[in-house]
Structures are given as structure tokens and as C-alpha cells.
Image (tube, rainbow, N blue to C red):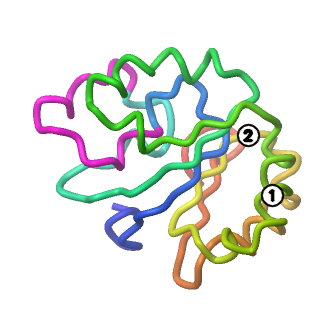
Amino acid sequence: MLFQLTSAKKTMEIDVYTGYSSPLPLPFPTTARHVYPSPQSSAFASILVGDMLMDQILAMDTNQGYYEVGLSTVQKAGVAHKIDFRESLALLVLDQLLQDETYHGSLDFIFVAVDKENYVNYHRRLLNLVKVGGLIAYERPGGGPA
């Protein structure tokens, strides 16, 4: 529903964990919509894919192994080319993105599920990356979207 409200085309997910959640807003073939074994792994997992046409997801985590858990499913769905995965500390990636003005105001939707003590530091950076009318969602400290 959040994607439908924002008409999100370009998104970011900070802390992909098992990688099952990142591709859910991408346009999957009908037969590929039900292949996720862990739909509760993050907020993205509760979103119906429908006919949305997501262009790109910039996903990051400090452990590429977590992302690779779900990679075969992403590849079977034919959307792996739409995910730009970066193995790094998220604050470092955000600082790099902020140095490139093409990223300023370019993201429609951002989901943050990492390092809850640093949410204020993420938020300061993300305000420069999200476009006017875009949405930044945070996982609440107990898990699940805030």
C-alpha cells in the first residue's frame, strides 16, 4: 500500500537481511508472486505487488550472505538486474550517494531497518535523497514498520 500511495519507482532498503523483501515491489510474473518462504521478513514483504512497475531498488547490508539467501528467488523472478546491492555500512553508502548530486531528491521510498540507535543520523542524510512527496519508513525497535 505504501508503494501505491507514493507511486514509488526508485527505492532504497537499508538492511536487506535475507534479501526476500527487496524485490517485492518489483513487477513479478504472476507465477513468481508466491515463491517467498518468509513474507514477514520486513515491511516490504507485506506489500502486494500488483501491477506496479518498480524501476530500481538500491539495497544495502553489511553481509552479502544475507542477501544471497533470497537471490535465487530474485533471479527466478527475472528482476535481479533491478536490484543494486551494496555490501557496506549504510552510513558510508549514504555519504557516498550524497556526494553525487544526481541522487539528491531521487528516491520515492526508503525503508530503514538497521542500527536503530543511529536513526537520527540516517534521517538527516535521507532527507536529501528522498524526493518531495516521497516516503521514509523506519522499522520500529521491536521489529516491523513504524
Viewer-proximal residue, 78 or 4?
A: 78
Identify the mark nearer the N-term, 2 or 1: 2
Query: In the picture, residue 35 is in which quadrant?
Result: top left
Kind of residue sitting beneath label 2:
Val
Kind of residue sitting beneath label 1:
Tyr
The reply, left or right, for residue 14 in relation to residue 94 is left
Give the total of numbered labels.
2
Viewer-proximal residue, 114 or 128?
A: 128
**SS at badge 2:** loop
Q: According to the image, label 2 marks what residue?
A: 114
Tag 2–tag 1 contact (CB < 8 Å): no
Residue occupying image coordinates x 79% and y 34%: 88
What separation in Å lies between label 2 and label 1 (alpha carbons)? 10 Å
**SS at badge 1:** helix
Q: Measured from the top left, where is residue 23 in percent x and y? A: 40, 39
Residue occupying image coordinates x 88% and y 59%: 121
The reply, left or right, for residue 57 in relation to residue 13 is left
In the image, the segment drawn in magenta is: 22-38
